[in-house]
Amino acid sequence: METYTAMRHFADSWALLAMTLFFLAVVAFVFRPGARKAAERAAEIPLKED
């Protein structure tokens, strides 16, 4: 039972912090200024004819 308690405390503190930082990094990456052009090119891929 002690292993479960230790893992639970880790998940409640450091793992939650790591997931939050990862989420914020992904959001910052998506909304960065240079991302618009890359997103528009990616959106047009299915519409291109070979």
Image: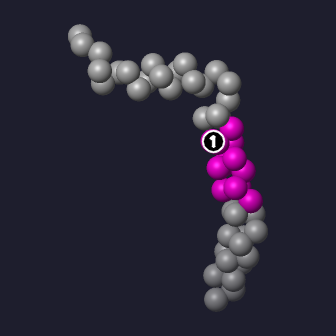
The region drawn magenta spans: 17-28
Query: With 41 as the anchor, is 17 left or right in this view?
Result: right
For label 1, the residue is: 26
Check disc 1 and give the amino acid type: Val
Residue drawn at x 64%, y 42% as measured from the top left: 27
Q: Is residue 6 left or right of residue 47?
A: right
**Extreme-top residue of the structure:** 50
Quarter of the picture containing the C terminus is top left
Q: Residue 43: horizontal and vertical position, in percent?
A: 41, 26
Q: Is 29 or 47 nearer to us in this picture?
A: 47
- Residue 20 against residue 24 in the figure, above or below: below
Near-viewer residue (8 or 47):
47
- Model colouring: one colour
Q: Position of residue 39 (x, y in %)?
A: 50, 26
Please name the residue shown 67% across and 74% down the image.
7
Circle 1 sits in a helix, a strand or a loop, which is it? Answer: helix
